[in-house]
Amino acid sequence: MDLYEHMGKDVFRAHGVPVPRGIVADSAEGGAAAARELGGSAVVKVQVQVGGRGKAGGVVLCRTPDEARDAAAGMLGASFKGLPVTRVLVEELLPIAREFYTSVLLDRSTGAYLWLLTAEGGMDIETLAQDRPQALRRLHVNPGLGLRPWHVRELVAALPVQAREPAADVLRAMWTVVLEADATLVEINPLVQLEDGSVVALDAKLSIDDNALFRHPDLEALADQFPLDPVERRAKEADLQYVKLDGDVGIIGNGAGLVMSTLDVVAQAGANAANFLDIGGGASADKMATSLQVILSDPAVRCVFINIFGGITRCDVVANGILAALRTVEATVPLVVRLDGTNAQEGRRILAAAAHPRIVPVATMDDAAAEAARLAKEPAA
Ligand code: GDP
Ligand code: MN
């Protein structure tokens, strides 16, 4: 789970990573009030889960509460890089002397944490890693042994002498965040040294291990504050496993394995999935209707591929389920249906007898994928 900057900074604060004073606002007036509270001048930062806000106008330095009001109004009124904006973070303006970069990332390939640090902050870290790798300190921290004094010394040696001690305190506090919050990523870009010598996290990117969320009910509860795609919300309410992708074939299948192979055959046929939905066992008419509603409400879908392998689920029940669903849901695009397994013959007979104008029954998975790919490329009827 990725946290918003302001949430990450709350976690930082709780574990001793210094951050600027800040107030979250969800209105222009709230933005002005926050700036007033912080002494008049402030930086207003859009809260979305995407980087590069600074370059895209998502971080605005304001000298007065009026400027903060305008900045907040501009951000809250619009989406940012396609993402909805529901809040801004208003922070005290700090006098920055130097900008650095540091991050700790769970490196699954080595079973350790990879720590990165560079004195060249403010730069794009991927670019730096490529162009000037010698400027980037990297070392692994074994989770069993923990962060050792020599790790810290080795890392801060990349910084100017006067920044090393306060930065070392920040690194130790970051490690506490990793351990206490089960973080898989802690990134501070920029980590800054202020004119008074102190070192502060000006930005916070924090990811929490989803599998550890049960240990952090307070963090898990934050998920309610993330805007959910309306289609995903509907699927969630109906207890369906739905995933949004970026192609144009909608996919409904029963069972995770079958759904995954359906994605593969569709890709082999030269198309891409717009989304997929696993209806699991027991494809009742109700479940099929909700599934179709969910899949069809995605405007990117040009064709739906329903791929069912009957086991305990009987294909005749599924066929009737599809037909019943189509009495309540309007099929706006063709539905390619492949039924195999238990009672497939009967299921296919039911579909053939119904002769629904939108249903295209196909006997094998490969042929169905090819047909779905072809239909998805046809101009809309
Ligand atoms: P990002 O671009 O999404 O990573 O957003 P950041 O939080 O990293 O902010 C981008 C840039 O805004 C930083 O690199 C700073 O240069 C600048 N900035 C942010 N907060 C302050 C502040 O309090 N004072 C000053 N002078 N600059 C700031
Ligand atoms: Mn940043």
Image: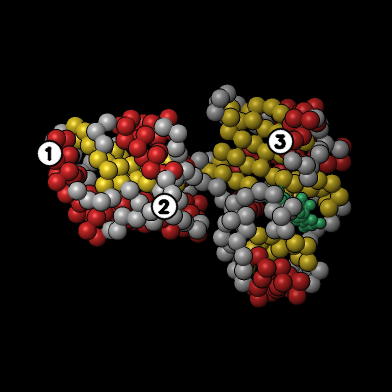
Spatial separation of the CA atoms under disc 3 and disc 1: 57 Å
**Helix, strand or loop under label 1:** helix
x, y percentage for residue 299?
44, 55
Spatial separation of the CA atoms under disc 3 and disc 2: 42 Å
Q: Which residue is mark 3?
A: 126
Residue drawn at (47%, 43%), measured in percent from left and top? 247
x, y percentage for residue 278?
32, 42
Kind of residue at badge 2: Ala
Can residue 85 be seen from the camera position used here? yes
Left or right relative to 306: residue 51: right
Q: Which residue is mark 2?
A: 380
Of the image marks 3 and 2, the number of the one nearer the N terminus: 3
Q: Residues within 10 Å of mark 3 (few under 14, many from 20)?
A: few
x, y percentage for residue 9?
64, 53
Picture mark count? 3
x, y percentage for residue 53?
69, 53
The circle on residue 346 is 1
Up the image or down, 287 lies above or below 140; here it is below
Kind of residue at badge 1: Glu
Of the image marks 3 and 1, the number of the one nearer the N terminus: 3
**Helix, strand or loop under label 3:** helix
State which quadrant residue 369 falls in: top left
Up the image or down, 118 lies above or below 76; here it is above
Circle 1/circle 2 CB separation < 8 Å:
no
Judge depth for marks 3 and 1 and give the one in front. Answer: 1
Kind of residue at badge 3: Glu
**Helix, strand or loop under label 2:** loop
Left or right relative to 334: residue 205: right
